[in-house]
Amino acid sequence: MRVLVACEFSGIVRDEFSRRGHDAWSCDLLDSEKTGRHIKGDAIAAARSGSWDMLIFHAPCTRLCNSGVRWLAERDLWKQMEEAALFFRTLLETDVPHICGENPIPHRYAVALIGRKYDQIIQPWQFGHGETKATCLWLKNLPPLMPTDVVDGRRDRVHMEPPGPERWKNRSRTYPGIARAMAEQWGTI
């Protein structure tokens, strides 16, 4: 399969699909942290440029997630939220047979602009990691991810990430167990 993992600088999901023999590429405005097939540029242009079989995207969540909804009115961020929702919706509606859009739990304004609610909520602790981080998946022609390794002793590590210039990066990386489950369960579609 030809797989595009958009808005991914880490290469984590890309590499799991590559390990299983797929022609997998990541795409981001940033360089990839790992060596591998990477398109540095606009995710929408990349998604529209190739004959991809699958698109997995991790759109920026800052203006779409429920945890930041209070700032929309307080800081007048409505326009930024609308742009973020349009970006998300455009990727979700791209002409690719199999799509997974990923984001934290969205607020109601984002859901309205995206055009539909998510299909599934997953947690890292369902895939071998002892942390909590509710992650929503919008699926097109893909089955829900099935848990692979449920772990006890859950903690909210991502939320407790200390302030600093790398905080957003550390909070946005896909957990390897989730990436592995995506490649194993969706790589045979």
Image (cartoon, rainbow, N blue to C red):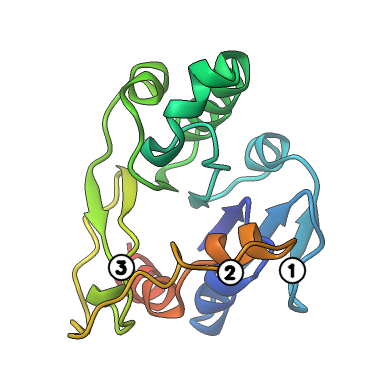
Where in the figure is residue 58, as x and y percent of width and height?
A: 52, 50
Instruction: Name the residue type under label 2.
Output: Arg
First-in-chain label (1 vs 2): 2
Q: State the residue position of label 2.
A: 14
Quick check: 163 above or below 110?
below
Find out whether the residues at labels 1 and 2 contact each other: C-beta distance under 8 Å.
yes
Residue drawn at (33%, 48%), measured in percent from left and top?
A: 137
SS under mark 2 = helix
Corner quadrant of residue 165:
bottom right
Q: The C terminus appears in which quarter of the rendering?
A: bottom left
Q: Position of residue 48 (x, y in %)?
A: 65, 35
Mark 3 — residue? 132
As measured in the structure, the alpha-carbon distance from the residue carrying label 2 to the one carrying label 3 is 23 Å
Mark 1: which amino acid? Arg
Rate crowding at label 2 as few (under 14), some (14 to 19) or many (20 or more) other CA atoms within 10 Å.
Answer: many
- Marks 3 and 1, how far apart in space? 30 Å
Q: Is residue 133 left or right of residue 9?
A: left
Between disc 2 and disc 3, the foreground one is: 3
Compared to residue 114, the image places residue 128 above or below, namely below
Identified at 53% across, 34% down, the residue is 91
Q: Residue at point 63% right, 41% down?
A: 47
Crowd tier of the residue under label 1, counting other residues whose Cα lies within 10 Å: few below 14, some 14–19, many 20 or above = some
- Is residue 61 visible to us here? yes
Label pair 3/1, CB-CB below 8 angstroms: no
Question: Label 1 belongs to which residue?
Answer: 37
> Label 3: few (<14), some or many (≥20) within 10 Å?
some
124 and 97: which one is in front?
A: 124
> Which of the pair 121/15 is nearer the observer?
121
Three-letter code, disc 3: Thr
